Image (cartoon, rainbow, N blue to C red):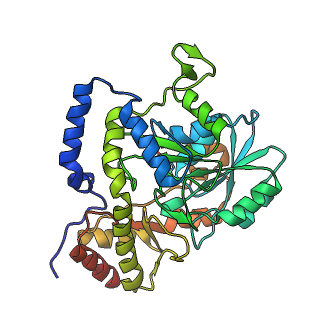
Amino acid sequence: MKEFNIPFLDLKLINQPYENEINDAFKKRVASGWFILGEEVQKFENAFADYCGTKYCIGVANGLDALILLLKASNFPKGAEIIVPSNTYIASILAISLAGFKPVLVEPDLATYLIDPQKIEEKITKKTKAILVVHLYGKCCEMLEIVKVAQNYSLKIFEDAAQSHGAYYGSKKAGNLSDAAGFSFYPTKNLGAMGDAGAITTNDDLLAKKIISLRNYGSGKKYVFEYQGMNSRLDEIQAAILNIKLPQLNLENEFRQKIANRYLSEIKNQKLVLPSSETQNKDAWHLFVVRVAERENFRNYLIEHGIGTDVHYPIPPHKQLAYRFWNKLSYPISEKIHKEVISLPLNIALTENQVSYIIEKINQY
Ligand SMILES: *Cc1c(COP(=O)(O)O)cnc(C)c1O
């Protein structure tokens, strides 16, 4: 079979279908003279709330800010403890620290890479106020079990939905499974802008009102400041791009699902642990993550055959210098995951032939 050169992700290629429409929208925005929090942002907020099934969507500057803002808006006392998985992207944990609270790590389930609901209760103290779940790699967490624990201890639940645009848990979508959710539209996400962008979704009237103020310096009315807020506003150009791409998100996710299905059914190599694929909850397949004992070997082998990969993520949060006071702690499941995971190409620019080639090369490894 013909050799390929397949990058892990080519941001130019995945945006090519939208190029003309985006160029037109850009010209229109330039001509309008209105650049921040305008009609495109309003339109996107309505459309994305509708998409997620929530009452509100509030556009903000990025995914990290979305999480910081929903935590800041929640009126927790100083030093409140927030439960979060130990194997997430650092932003989930940073958001808790930056909002002034204490992240408490809980190990994931090795089969799903998602927070293990059985391990939450033992980490709850008098100071615990919320659980921030992360729908990692595009798969929704076990919300039924998590809600049970949260109700027993009167905890809030929040979602880090930065990797799960359009994922379902039962009949509801990610972003509509908790008190509030943070989304990122970083260019590599399932719904990606051409710069930084993010949003909060919620059904809570009071929380929404406060976040709308907090994202704009704590101001509900021009030059009147009710809170010490942030500048985390969404701009019109990013919103216009998101308005062009959102109507295609379901189709793009189905495309991802098809590639994932092929990987799941056609990769037959005992050296690899494939992701779990239960069907009841629909995966957004943000990433197709496999585990391999000798990751660097495997990764180099794929590079030799022109196949790009990435690692999400190589160092667990508790081993980062940013959290040096955790460095001696042990989270063995998380450590194993970070040592063994590798992400295969999974994006809308892949052709059938390229997918066949990737599968063939993996099966020959
Ligand atoms: C991308 C991401 C974020 C942060 O989003 P930014 O827009 O880059 O700030 C947060 N959490 C997870 C799980 C992510 O993947």
Task: Choose between 323 and 46: the one closer to the eye.
Answer: 46
Does residue 134 appear in this view?
A: yes
Residue at the limit of the structure toward the left, as seen here: 2
Does residue 116 appear in this view?
A: no
Q: Give the percent coordinates (x, y) of residue 252.
A: 34, 62
Q: Give the percent coordinates (x, y) of residue 229.
A: 58, 25
Residue 1 is left or right of residue 189, and the answer is left
Residue 329 location, quadrant: bottom right
- Residue at image position (75%, 45%) is 129
Vertical order, 91 against 139 (above or below)? above
Residue at the limit of the structure toward the right, as seen here: 126
Task: Choose between 156 and 355: the one closer to the eye.
Answer: 156
- Residue at image position (45%, 86%) is 270
Q: Give the percent coordinates (x, y) of residue 279.
A: 52, 77
Task: Choose between 128 and 228: the one closer to the eye.
Answer: 228
- Residue at image position (26%, 31%) is 29
Q: Give the percent coordinates (x, y) of residue 2.
A: 15, 78
Quarter of the rendering occupied by the N terminus: bottom left
Residue 123 location, quadrant: bottom right
Vertical order, 137 against 220 (above or below)? below
Quarter of the rendering occupied by the C terminus: bottom left
Task: Choose between 42 and 277: the one closer to the eye.
Answer: 42
Vertical order, 104 against 263 (above or below)? above
Total count of labels: 0
Residue 232 is left or right of residue 55, and the answer is left
